[in-house]
Structures are given as C-alpha cells and as structure tokens.
Image (cartoon, grey):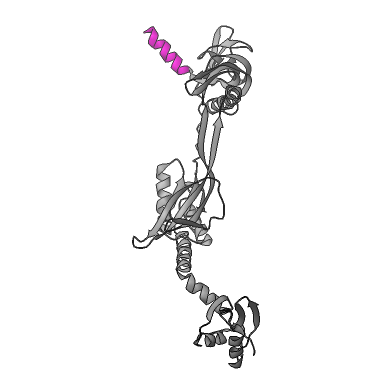
C-alpha cells in the first residue's frame, strides 16, 4: 500500500474477551495492522482511515475506542472538538487587527490653542481623525509635507507620530524675527534677602560688595552713572548677582506610604471573558502591576462570552514604611527636590541641617535648614522710580 501525504491513521483500542479471534477476523477482511500492542484484556492497533471505517461498520460486542489520530483526520478532529474556541480566536484576531488600525485619538502638543485647532482641522481634511483608519507611512509623511508647505510662515517644524491607536503631533511655531532693542534704563535689584557672594556686570554702577548683606529690593547694580556727585547718564544695567540665601523646609512623611505611578510602558491586548474565566491575547509584555482601560467591547447578552480591546498601562507600585531613622534621609531628598523645583536646577546647596524631627498622629514631621547659592537678580526700571518720587513730592 502506497501512503500519501493526505492519508490519515488511527490508533484503535479494542477491548473484550478473546481479542485474538477478533483480530484474526479483521485479518481475513484484509485490514492491515500498521502497528499492534497487546495489553491486558485489550489491544491497540494502528490502521488507515479507510480500514478504521470498515471496523466501525462491523457489528460486534467488542468495545472500539480511538486513542490517537494522525494526519489530516487529526486536524479535522481537533477543529470539530474546539470549533467554538477556534471561531472566537479567529474573530478576536480579526477584531484586534481591525481595532489596532483605527485611530481612537489625535493629540497636538502645543500651548497655542488656535494653532492646535488649525492643525487638527488640516489633519482631518487629510484623512487623520478620530475613528478613521490609520494611514501608511508614506501617506503620513506626505500629509506632514503638505501642512508644512501650506503654513510655511506659521510652522517651523512638524512631526506626526503614531503611538498604537493614537496619533501624537509635535509642532514648533515659527518665530517672527523682530529686531526690537529695549534700552530702557534700569537698576538691578535684590530679588530676596541674602549675603552677596559674586557680582558679574557688563554695564551699570556696582553698588554692593562681596559678603555684604542685602535685603529684598536693595539696588545692587545701578543704572544711573555718576562722576563724583554728578549724574552723567542713565543706562540699562546688565549683569547677575549671586548670593547665599537661607530656607527652612517642612516635610511630612506618613508612617506607611503607598503610591501607584504609571510608567511610559503600555500595550494593546485582546481580552476574552468566557463564563467566569478571562484570557488575554497579545500581552507580550508581562507587567507585574498594571491598570486596564477598555477601549472597545463586543458582547451579546445571550452568550456567556465577550471580546474587548484593552489598553494595559504598566504601574509602578511604591510601598514604604518610614521610621525616625530613615525619615531624615527621605526628607532631605524631598526637600532638595522641592527647592530645585521652586528656585531652579542651577542652584547650589551649600549646607544642610536637620533642625527638628517629631511624630504627629500618623506621620513624621521633619524640618530641614538650607544655605543656598543662587542668582538673586531682579530688575527695576528707573523711569518708574522717578515717577514714584514725583508723585510722593506732589
């Protein structure tokens, strides 16, 4: 017998008394045994699909059971057994392909509302809008060039980036070149109290010295130039003054701190709920902690199944327990972070000291003291001073 690629085979288990006699009868019917294994009160024979059907047609008291199927028949048998699951799988995959090629959001990143609305309208006209199909890379680049060409006097730079089912548009507005020079006379004054440590000046009259204490509003570099006692000119004072300043920062820490912080990692997955079981597909990244947002859900109240497109956002979970021993270290990090947010990253911390640590209710309160080296430069127009002085005289 010649065996082709499409031939199927069956491992058939036959149970009953006097099995050898039954096998002898099968042999007389020219049924070929490709393999035979004897067990207690049973035998397993391997036969072709055609011979298997002939065995089933025999009226017999022997119990006949299929143990294993080979070839094409095994595929047919699998499909017949799991047809519902396979149907859901195919539908889910098709839905995933469809939904991942639909635009669910378009965001333009810019502070100017008018410019954002203008670009959104142009994108809509070009075929990029909510619930539209995503465009090809070449089409996307062509749309970008069209917008840049149309608004060359308003837009300096534009980038269209696809992030899953969302388009994010980054834009830079073209700045008009206005060569307007402001030469209004002014003084440089102290923005806050401090001990002068460094003075850098390119114009104006320096009125303070290093290690001199100044108060907020004191004139540091004057815009009025004198020759002895005589005023000879008014200029725009230019420069920077750096000083040592002082701050106290109160930091409150709970005994137990819990935070769930979203990361930059996310993925779109298909979620299938079957009765009370849930299955995720295409979740290639396994997050330890995540938050899920349903974008689209397909379900029928008559069937115990639903299919959803879900955005899975990774979440970083932070759990800390504070004691007096570790509170100072944590308070230092928090206080320095707040100082740099308020004063600028360029400040320099000269000195740090813990002034007080106390327990209040369910929290620990830490008071930190800092010496900071920072720029205390501020400006005051001289014309405003003259007008104020004249008003006071009147």
Q: Is residue 240 in view from this perspective? A: no
Q: Nearer the viewer, residue 73 or 133?
A: 73
Residue drawn where x is 50% and y is 32% of the image: 180
Residue 393 on the magenta segment:
yes
Residue reaching furthest to the front? 17
Residue under the image location 55 percent in, 46 percent down: 288
Percent x, y of residue 114: 40, 44
- Between 298 and 188, which is closer to the camera in this rendering? 298
Relative to 115, 251 lies left or right: right
Q: Position of residue 378 (x, y in %)?
A: 52, 21
Is residue 280 shown to the viewer in this render?
Answer: yes
Q: Nearer the viewer, residue 175 or 46?
A: 46
The residue drawn where x is 43% and y is 50% is 119
Quadrant for the N terminus in the image: bottom right
Which image quarter is the C terminus in?
top left
Left or right: 197, with 384 as reference point: right
Range covered by the magenta-colored residues = 382-394
Q: Main secondary structure of the magenta part?
A: helix
Nearest the camera: 243 or 251? 251
Residue 172 among those drawn in magenta: no
Residue 159, horizontal then vertical, whole percent: 52, 51
> Residue at 54% across / 36% down in the picture?
318
Q: Quadrant of residue 225?
A: top right
């Amino acid at each position: 017998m010649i065996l082709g690629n499409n031939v199927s085979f069956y491992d058939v288990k036959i149970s009953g008394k006097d099995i050898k006699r039954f096998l002898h009868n099968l042999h007389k019917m020219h049924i070929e045994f490709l393999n035979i294994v004897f067990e207690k009160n049973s035998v397993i024979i391997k036969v072709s699909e055609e011979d298997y059907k002939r065995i089933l047609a025999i009226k017999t008291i022997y119990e006949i059971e299929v143990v294993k199927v080979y070839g094409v028949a095994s595929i047919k048998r699998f499909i017949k057994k799991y047809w519902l699951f396979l149907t859901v799988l195919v539908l889910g995959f098709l839905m995933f392909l469809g939904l991942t090629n639909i635009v669910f959001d378009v965001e333009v990143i810019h502070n100017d509302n008018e410019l954002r609305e203008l670009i959104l309208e142009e994108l809509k006209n070009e075929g990029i809008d909510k619930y539209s199909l995503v465009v090809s890379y070449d089409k996307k680049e062509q749309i970008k060039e069209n917008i840049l060409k149309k608004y060359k006097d308003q837009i300096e730079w534009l980038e269209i980036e696809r992030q899953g089912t969302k388009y994010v548009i980054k834009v830079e507005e073209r700045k008009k070149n206005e060569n307007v020079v402001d030469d209004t006379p002014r003084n440089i004054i102290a923005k806050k109290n401090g001990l002068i440590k460094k003075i850098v000046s390119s114009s104006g009259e320096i009125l303070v010295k290093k290690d001199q204490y100044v108060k907020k509003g004191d004139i540091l570099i004057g815009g009025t130039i004198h020759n002895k006692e005589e005023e000879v000119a008014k200029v725009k004072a230019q420069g920077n003054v750096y000083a040592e300043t002082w701050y106290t920062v109160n930091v409150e820490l709970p005994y137990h701190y819990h935070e769930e912080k979203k990361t930059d990692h996310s993925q779109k997955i298909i979620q299938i709920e079957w009765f009370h079981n849930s299955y995720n597909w295409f979740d290639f990244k396994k997050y330890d902690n995540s938050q899920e947002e349903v974008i689209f859900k397909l379900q029928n109240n008559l069937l115990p199944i639903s299919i959803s497109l879900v955005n899975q956002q990774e979440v970083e979970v932070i759990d800390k327990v504070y004691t007096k021993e570790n509170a100072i270290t944590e308070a230092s990090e928090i206080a320095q972070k707040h100082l740099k947010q308020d004063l600028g990253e360029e400040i320099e911390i000269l000195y740090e000291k813990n002034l007080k640590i106390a327990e209040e209710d369910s929290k620990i309160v830490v008071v930190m003291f800092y010496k900071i080296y920072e720029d205390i430069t501020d400006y005051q127009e001289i014309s405003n001073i003259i007008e104020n002085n004249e008003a006071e005289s009147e």
